[in-house]
Amino acid sequence: MANEKQFTYWNEVAGPKWVKVGDEMDSRFTAITDLLVTQADVKPGERVLDIGCGMGPTTFCFADKAGPEGHVTGIDISTPMLNVARQRGAGIPRLDFLLADAQTFQFDAAKFNVLASRFGVMFFGDPVAAFTNLRAALVPGGRVCFVCWATLDENPHWNIPFQLVAQRLGYPEERPARAPGPMAFADAGYVAEILTRAGYSDIAVTPTPVPIIGKNLTEEAQIACLLGPSGALTDEKQADEATRQILREEISTALAQFDGPHGIKLPATVNVVTATNR
Ligand SMILES: C[S@@+](CC[C@H](N)C(=O)[O-])C[C@H]1O[C@@H](n2cnc3c(N)ncnc32)[C@H](O)[C@@H]1O
């Protein structure tokens, strides 16, 4: 299997965590979803593939845009996340969910008008192979539009908790630069190179500031200790519950600077990536 480690990770570790906080993540990512849906500009009647669709938040948005004549497929390797997506999407006719690896799945040729993703394409062991495989599923002239995280420095919502965890528990074991993970596509030039090598045209990678809207500091600190670079480091260092509690308190205090009268607004930057199959 091409992405065996990620398969295990998204089925046994990260998937169950995302299922726990799925609703919170969706409300935090509202502005990012709006940005993606606007940029993808799915037209009525179009066929869309949502890559690494998770529990389907963006898949449902694309289905709305594609309308009754269109169709949307969400593909993902995580059974727990797809189970939620299927429950949520039950009864919607122009939608299906596929449990498969987007890097290697043999799609019907030229099946989709649009390949889209919110944070679902940074986990391929061989990104060029994955995007080459995906391009074969695009009609000539078809479009790619996805968002991925820019650098850690441009994402204080991850970086502040990550630095606090690292100060207390140490930095992560060294791993290859750009190893599959949430920050693997942070370098705009690297993403453009992947898409060029995979045969796409009209490639644009645009770092775009966008807020993450949090509900309260307690929830933000919980999410930071669960997911992303800070959550992964907390797990890697096998922090016990007492240490996690201290970290949650430290993170909550550090993020208080972003708490305002209208809730928490954390600064973030995503790379908006667009390309065509010409
Ligand atoms: C950070 S989550 C994002 C989920 C969803 N797009 C969202 O924004 O809520 C990344 C998703 O990519 C999926 N994924 C990772 N590697 C994949 C692969 N090779 N093929 C398909 N999905 C993959 C994971 O299972 C996970 O659901």
Image: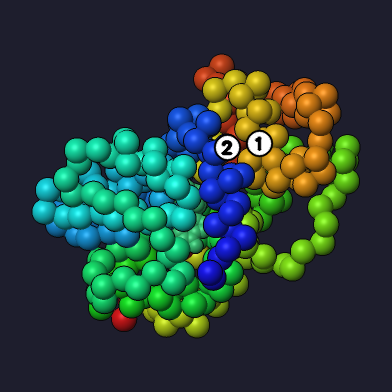
For the residue carrying disc 1, how many other residues have a C-alpha within 10 Å: few (<14), some (14-19), or many (20+)? many
Name above or below for residue 254 compared with residue 207: above
Q: Is residue 50 visible?
A: no
Q: CA distance from mark 1 to mark 2?
A: 7 Å
Image quadrant assignment for residue 224: top right
Judging depth in this view, the residue of 16 and 226 nearest the camera is 16
Q: Residues within 10 Å of mark 2 (few under 14, many from 20)?
A: some
Q: Is residue 136 left or right of residue 214?
A: left
Amino acid bearing label 2? Lys
- Counting residues from the start of the chain, the first of labels 1 and 2 encountered is 2
- The residue positioned farthest toward the top in the image shown: 261
Screen quadrant of the C terminus: bottom left
Image quarter of residue 107: bottom left
- In the rendered image, which residue does mark 1 sit on? 226
Q: Do callouts 1 and 2 mark residues in contact (Cβ within 8 Å)? A: yes
Q: Position of residue 271 (x, y in %)?
A: 53, 57
Specify the amino acid type for callout 1: Leu
246 displayed left or right of 153: right
**Mark 2, residue position:** 17
Residue at the (19%, 38%) spot, across then down: 91
Instruction: Please identify, in this view, whether the residue under mark 1 or under mark 2 is nearer the observer.
Output: 2
